């Protein structure tokens, strides 16, 4: 029988209960369903290093990188499940002033045989392995390397040598029961922050 618990409840097991209530609430979608949640917020900062512009054509091809920078950027994040699989789908819609909305789409799969690990995939089977944990109410993702899904194969890719290591967290806002903060950083050991963004979100009625 298919497990229809929320994806991160499956990933975290008992640690799911250590997440802040607002974090659990916007990830309660059941796999194999038409569940959909949207959160809205503002990115205080969307940044990439000047030299990282050289990576943008490749990033746009794979749908993996936000190509613009800015502050106070409105954003909607749509989380969806589908009736025919156990994946979690993301559509992050950045609304940079003077530009068409930019969609950063991906999907996430639980790697059950690796316990608390997921893989976030973008186009053409490029994925990032992520260790997931619950820390002081926050949902935390730590980079464990890149892979290329080719049929049944999962081939390691040395992209971290160029992009650095990712860290992502979603943390409850202690001043707002319906609010949380989010940050993502790709940090290279020699070049510093290659990409980063951070912002505040509110979970409204669904």
Image (cartoon, helix red, strand yellow):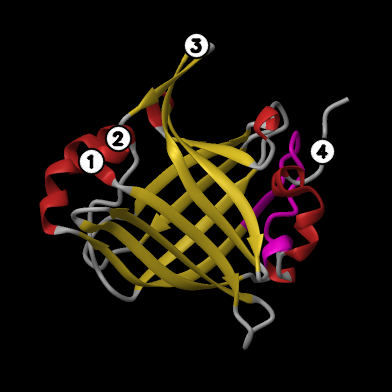
The percent coordinates of residue 163 (x first, y second) are 27, 44
Q: Is residue 36 magenta?
A: yes
The answer to whether residue 46 is above or below residue 109 is below
Disc assigned to residue 54: none
The structure residue drawn at horizontal position 31% and vertical position 40%, both measured from the top left corner, is 160
Disc assigned to residue 4: 4
Image quadrant in which the N terminus is located: top right
The structure residue drawn at horizontal position 30% and vertical position 35%, both measured from the top left corner, is 159
Label 3: which secondary element: loop
Residue bounds of the magenta highlight: 23-37
Q: Nearer the viewer, mark 2 or mark 4?
A: 2
Disc 2: CA contacts within 10 A as few (<14), some (14-19) or many (>=20): few
Q: Pointer 1 and pointer 4: residues touching (CB < 8 Å)?
A: no
Q: Which residue is mark 1?
A: 162
Looking at the image, is mark 2 or mark 4 earlier in the sequence? 4
Label 2: which secondary element: loop
Looking at the image, is mark 3 or mark 1 earlier in the sequence? 3
Q: Which residue is mark 2?
A: 159
Q: Which residue is mark 3?
A: 151
Disc 1: CA contacts within 10 A as few (<14), some (14-19) or many (>=20): some
Q: Main secondary structure of the magenta part?
A: loop
The percent coordinates of residue 198 (x first, y second) are 40, 68
Label 1: which secondary element: helix
Q: Nearer the viewer, mark 1 or mark 4?
A: 1
Q: Pointer 3 and pointer 1: residues touching (CB < 8 Å)?
A: no
The answer to whether residue 118 is above or below residue 125 is below
Q: Nearer the viewer, mark 3 or mark 1?
A: 1
């Amino acid at each position: 029988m298919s497990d229809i618990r929320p994806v991160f409840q499956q990933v975290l097991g008992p640690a799911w209960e250590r997440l802040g209530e607002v974090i659990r609430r916007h990830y309660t979608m059941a796999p194999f369903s038409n569940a959909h949640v949207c959160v809205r917020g503002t990115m205080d900062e969307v940044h990439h290093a000047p030299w990282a512009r050289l990576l943008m054509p490749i990033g746009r091809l794979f749908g993996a990188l936000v190509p613009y920078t800015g502050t106070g950027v409105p954003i909607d994040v749509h989380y969806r499940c589908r009736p025919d699989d156990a994946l979690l789908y993301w559509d992050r819609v950045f609304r940079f002033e003077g530009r068409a909305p930019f969609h950063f789409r991906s999907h996430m799969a639980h790697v059950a045989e690796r316990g608390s690990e997921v893989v976030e995939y973008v186009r053409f089977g490029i994925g990032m392995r992520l260790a997931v944990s619950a820390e002081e109410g926050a949902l935390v993702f730590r980079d464990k390397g890149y892979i290329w899904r080719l049929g049944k194969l999962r081939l390691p890719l040395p992209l971290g040598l160029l992009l650095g290591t990712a860290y992502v967290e979603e943390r409850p806002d202690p001043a707002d029961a319906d609010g949380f903060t989010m940050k993502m950083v790709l940090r290279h050991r020699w070049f510093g922050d290659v990409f980063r963004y951070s912002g505040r979100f509110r979970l409204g009625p669904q």
